[in-house]
Image: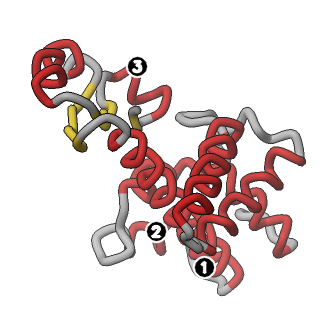
Amino acid sequence: PVSGGDRGAKNGTLAIFAGGDEAIVNRLNPIFTLMGKVNYMGPSGKGQFAKLANQITIASTMVGLVEGIIYAHKAGLNVASFLDAISTGAAGSKSLDLYGSRILKRDFDPGFFVNHFVKDLGICLKECQNMGLALPGLALAQQLYLSLKAHGEGNLGTQALILALERLNNATLGS
């Protein structure tokens, strides 16, 4: 399993979650490193668990990012200045760096498609159920992303999550 979406694949910057026999993973490293950074996660199956944990983390991070943006907008802040201000503090994140300015520019070209993310979040929720885990942030994120899909926005990038929050709050950035 990998993280980094279509852009990471094209740029050779994927995070690769490798599971299985460590000696075999090490032997394949020269090939894997052409695609990105190899992270050995443990025996067979652990790479998939790491990918699911990655998707859970991204889902809640994206919800927090777009909620902060909507709040800043409704509070009358200059949202670009707000994003710049938080980028070096505790709220700074790779998601903010990758998507903050793209959200403000209404650039919803996919690095990772909403449709694919909805599928992944569904797998995460099923696995959580199997493990007896309650992850309400994950469930909320899936519902918000499903609303994008229901509005025909499944082929947009995951940063299009702002559209769901705009609809919920009768707000549009820049207006």
**Label 2 SS:** helix
Labels 1 & 2 near each other (Cβ < 8 A): yes
Kindly indicate the quadrant of the structure image that contains residue 127: bottom right
Counting other residues with Cα less than 10 Å from the Cα at mark 1, is it few (<14), some (14-19), or many (20 or more)?
Answer: some
Residue type at mark 2 is Leu
Q: Do residues under tags 1 and 3 come within 8 Å of each other at their CB atoms?
A: no
Asked which secondary structure carries label 3, the reply is helix
Display coloring: secondary structure
State left or right for residue 51 relative to residue 162: left
What secondary structure is marked by label 1? helix
- Residue, disc 2: 83
Give the residue pinned by disc 1: 72
Q: Which sits in the foreground, 139 or 115? A: 139
Marks 1/2: CA–CA distance: 9 Å
**Precedes in sequence: disc 1 or disc 2:** 1
| Quarter location, residue 89 | bottom left
Mark nearest the camera among 1 and 3 is 3
Say what amino acid the circle numbered 1 marks.
Ala
Residue 79 seen in this snapshot: no
Residue 102 appears anywhere in the view: yes
How far across and how far down the image is residue 155, in percent?
73, 33
Residue at the disc numbered 3: 10
Asked whether 26 or 85 is in front, the reply is 26
Instruction: In this rendered view, identify the residue nearer to me: 18 or 168.
Output: 18
91 vs 12: above or below: below
| Residue pictured at 57% horizontal, 75% vertical | 68
